[in-house]
Image (tube, rainbow, N blue to C red):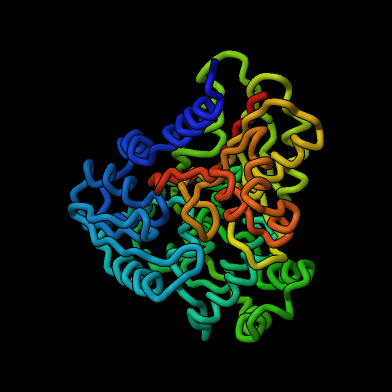
Amino acid sequence: MTDNRAVARHMFDVGVAAADPYGAVARAVTEVPTPALIIAVGKAASRMAQAALAAFQVPCIIVTNSENAKPVAGAQVFAAGHPVPDMAGAKAAHAVISALEQAAGPVLVLISGGGSALLPAPAGLLTLADKSALNMVLLASGLSIGKMNLIRQQVSDLKGGGMLRHCFYPVTALILSDVVGDDLSTIASGPTAPPLGTSAQAISVLREAGIWEATPLAVRTHLETADVQYSLPSAHNVLVGSNSQSVAAMVATQQGISPILTPVEGDVSAAARLICDHACPGITVWGGETTVQISGTGKGGRNQELALRIACEARQRGWGDFTCLAGGTDGRDGPVDAAGGLVDAGTLGRIEAAGGDIDALLANNDSYAALGLAGDLLMTGATGTNVADLGVLIR
């Protein structure tokens, strides 16, 4: 009898492996001019930098999250806060700006997901505390990653092409995309790409989302008074890995796999219904990045809640046998140590047998506790890459 949980995990691992940052950079650096400096930022920064350093023995700064921060020969490594920016990230940003301004030749920038929070450089008179408070509001808002990054760019010295402001030589950027649609201005908030919008547009997004009044006063003041337009040089931006490439690798593992052709985005409740609507008998795979409107005080993340909601949807539809995995390719889903959830037809029964109230747990956004009761948390550890989320549903 086929172990569908093992099959789902294998397919997820194949998708993650397809986004291996070392291989992606190793293939791309053959077309890169010899740099005088390497800057690597994001959750995959260490592996990307190792590949670049194998080709170029030049000064290198790596800024990554603590789970992926390991010594790399020939590089200065900073472990910074994620998803909430911290002083370590601010120190790293200062080091990056200084290195860019002192570079004696072309610069190679390696960008991966997570860079937006990892490299906080407050703009104008803003402080790191202001940016951290803003980030907490944004993370709880349910806004898309694109809209969050539009706002973040307006309060940062490095995002939205800001790195280019500090460079006096040509810049090449190799980019591992964690953003659905691969908009280079959105990945890590686009440090080498044109900005997503203006301060006026950021204000409109905050107002439309109903979080303008919850936004720190200093941020509101900055957005209302500091809509400065900069003329920035362009960079040579190259996409070297993406969510869609990982989904394609999953599809290629065997015949008969059905991909959901459009990325799965938006609210997790609607996404759970959409996935189940697409799931014919067999194996369905998808990529994307959902959002969660936080109304409770529990712990979890979008993939854990998506997996739990799919289990609930499957029960309502009377499915007798299914297995579903939803996971973040970086190995971390929200502010917990799980990558997501791996559920089946017995998940809800195990939660209830352990004394859990599924509706109450979901209402409290406590998917981590719910899946923990069932033994259905997806635990991978840090993967060293990040290309958004992947999912597998087997019926």
* Residue drawn at (75%, 48%) of the image: 269
Quadrant in the picture for residue 41: bottom left
> How many labels sit on residues?
0
| Image-based side of 381 in relation to 314, left or right | left
Q: Where does the image place residue 380, in percent across and percent down from the top left?
A: 43, 43
The C terminus lies in quadrant: top right
The reply to whether residue 183 is in sight is no
| Image-based side of 160 in relation to 270, left or right | left
The N terminus lies in quadrant: top right
Q: Is 308 in front, or is 216?
A: 308
Asked if 320 appears above or below 290 in the picture, the reply is: above
Quadrant in the picture for residue 153: bottom right
Q: Is 333 in front, or is 356?
A: 356
* Residue drawn at (50%, 20%) of the image: 253
Asked if 243 appears above or below 395 in the picture, the reply is: below
Q: Is 377 in front, or is 239?
A: 377
Q: Where does the image place residue 117, in percent across and percent down from the top left?
A: 49, 64
| Image-based side of 234 in relation to 210, left or right | left
Q: Where does the image place residue 30, in percent across and percent down from the top left?
A: 30, 35
Q: Is 307 in front, or is 226?
A: 307
* Residue drawn at (58%, 70%) of the image: 135
* Residue drawn at (70%, 39%) of the image: 311
The reply to whether residue 73 is in sight is yes
Asked if 129 appears above or below 176 in the picture, the reply is: below
